[in-house]
Amino acid sequence: YPALSFANHCCKPSVGVRFDGGQAFLFPEEDLQAGDEITIHYAETANIKTWTQLQHFLEFNYGFKCIAGCKCGIFAASGK
């Protein structure tokens, strides 16, 4: 999935990803305009329930942590 690796992570992504064999298919989650950033949720299928779980998952698998107060608002930085 070399082209997919260009998409950044967001907990509220602009596109969803469906895998079929060796191919990944992107589908819009919102209206996209030319120049909009393509983002995907790196942990979408990981059954993550809390901010802490998300942080551990992203750091272990991708080497970064989501920033506190990110625009997604899915989790509060308090661990909820």
Image: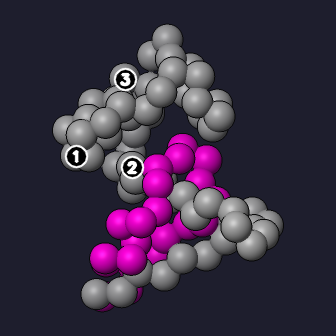
Marks 1 and 3, Cα distance to the nearest angstrom?
A: 14 Å
Residue 77 image point, x, y percent: 50, 17
Residue at 36 percent across and 86 percent down: it is: 23
Q: What stretch of residues is rendered in magenta?
A: 1-21
* Number of residues whose C-alpha sits closer than 10 Å to that of mark 2, classed few (under 14), some (14–19) or many (20 or more): some
User: Residue 61 got which mark?
Assistant: 1
Q: Are marks 2 and 1 in contact (CB under 8 Å)?
A: yes
Q: Is residue 3 above or below residue 10?
A: below
Marks 2 and 1, Cα distance to the nearest angstrom?
A: 9 Å
Residue 43 image point, x, y percent: 39, 49
Residue at 74 percent across and 73 percent down: it is: 34
Give the amino acid at mark 1. Answer: Asn
Give the amino acid at mark 3. Answer: Thr
Residue at 63 percent across and 37 percent down: it is: 72
Q: Which residue is mark 2?
A: 43
Q: Nearer the viewer, residue 1 or 75?
A: 1
Q: Secondary structure at mark 3?
A: helix
